[in-house]
Image (cartoon, rainbow, N blue to C red):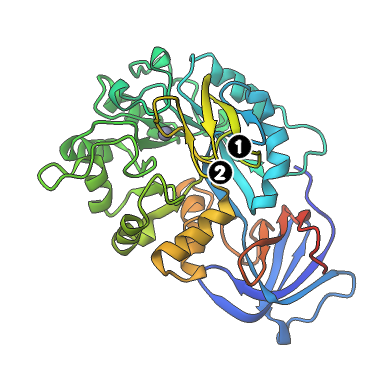
Amino acid sequence: MEAGNTMLYIQARVVTPNKVIEEGAVVVANGRITAVAAASSLPPPPTAQVIQSPNYVLVPGFIDLQLNGAFGHDFTQHPETIWQVATQLPRYGVTSFLPTIITSPLVTVPLAQQVLGQRPAAFRGAEPLGLHLEGPFINPQKKGAHNPHHIQLPTLEAVAGWQPEAYVRLVTLAPEMPGAMAVIAALSAQGVIVSAGHSLATFAIAGASFEAGVRYGTHLFNAMLTLHHREPGLAGALLADKHTVIGIIPDGIHVHPALLKLVWQTAAPRLNVVTDAMAALGMPPGTYDLGGFSVTVDETTCRLPDGTLAGSILSMDTAVRNLITYTGCTLAEAMTTVTTIPANLLGLGQHKGHIAPGYDADLVLLTPALHIAMTIVNGQIIYQQPNHET
Ligand code: ZN
């Protein structure tokens, strides 16, 4: 990967996010963060490009673990569009992401693996960290917007080549399906994060799946048993467990804001905000593709003709602002859900998700209203809000 060799000096309110430096400064060189301190004790190096925005906030770049496509492109139908979409994602503060392939013929997976293996020369954009395979081993009764014709029972043969080295990072499956527990164990041993989702798992089955290796829950409350006081199901098991990370879509539609607040009060240190955005993100209302289905998109919502929710048009920066609005949390707290928590889940917490010396220079400069002013990936300024002057 080509690292930015420009040296940057950014003066802003720095949210690392574990620590807040009110009048802070960050130095970036060769794609890495080299210094973080109070601006008063850290003068700009003579050769650095100086970005002085003391009223703005510098945070780590956002990591989206569930993104189906954007800008008119659907990754499941057209995996070859991943790199193209990636070039535009920094406008939402996204510096790395998991392109998500939903239930489709199994041959889609090697196609997508191949695409990720062929990094375009001089690529500049949000870094795809590997695939999130959401399906095809899901429960047909919780298919959501997935095509039931392509749903399969999990087998060890099918997942033999799924590992981070071959660009598979996260797999969502339904643990109650026959054969799933063995596949959970195998994928975990191969270094893949396994998630429970699109599932009718009871509380007991969910607990057994955590024992087998499941460490994540895909879009809490959506496509799982409704939380019931006598059968808490997968949702209740995720909330009660202390070790799993919980994915959630804060668009105000997939989960009621009041329930999101309750989840926050229960499980904030394990919450991971995802967009689950689809091809219509960044596009006007209309009809778009999701995994081969036609989806009608208005100003807020994406639905199949029968009304089933089919992904979102939520951008990552909107997701962060929504989380703060719905829960009343601080910016630093909101930041953990899109930086340290996903980075740690993927085992990348030693170089992504945090502003500290030695970390990848994936940074977002936010305006006081928390809109994206600038996005830096790997030490290079990839996006700059048109009227933002540095
Ligand atoms: Zn889903």
Quadrant in which the N terminus appears: top right
Picture coordinates of residue 318, whole percent (x, y): 56, 55
Question: Spatial distance from mark 1 to mark 2, Cα to Cα?
Answer: 6 Å
Residue type beneath disc 2: Glu
Q: Three-letter amino acid code at disc 1? A: Pro
Instruction: Work out whether 243 lies above or below 323.
Output: above
Residue occupied by mark 2? 299
Quick check: 61 above or below 302? below
Which residue appears farthest toward the bottom when viewing the image? 40
Q: Is residue 337 left or right of residue 284?
A: left
Q: Secondary structure at mark 2?
A: loop
Question: In this orientation, does residue 29 appear?
Answer: yes
Report which quarter residue 363 is drawn in. Answer: bottom right
In which quadrant of the rendered view does residue 145 lie? top left
User: Is residue 163 rendered to the left or right of residue 122?
Assistant: left
| Residue labelled 2 has its Cβ within 8 Å of some atom of ligand 1 | no
Residue 291 visible in image: no
Foreground pick, 255 / 211: 255
**Ligand 1 contact, mark 1 (Cβ < 8 Å):** no
Residue 146 is left or right of residue 361, and the answer is: left
> Which percent across, then down, holds residue 298?
54, 38
Residue at point 21% right, 37% down? 208
Residue furthest right in the image: 47
Q: Secondary structure at mark 1?
A: loop
Above or below, 156 relative to 62:
above
Q: Determine contact: label 1, label 2, CB under 8 Å.
A: yes
N-term-proximal mark, 1 vs 2: 1
- Label 2 Cα neighbours within 10 Å, binned few <14 / some 14-19 / many ≥20: few
Q: Which residue is denoted by mark 1 in the rendering?
A: 285
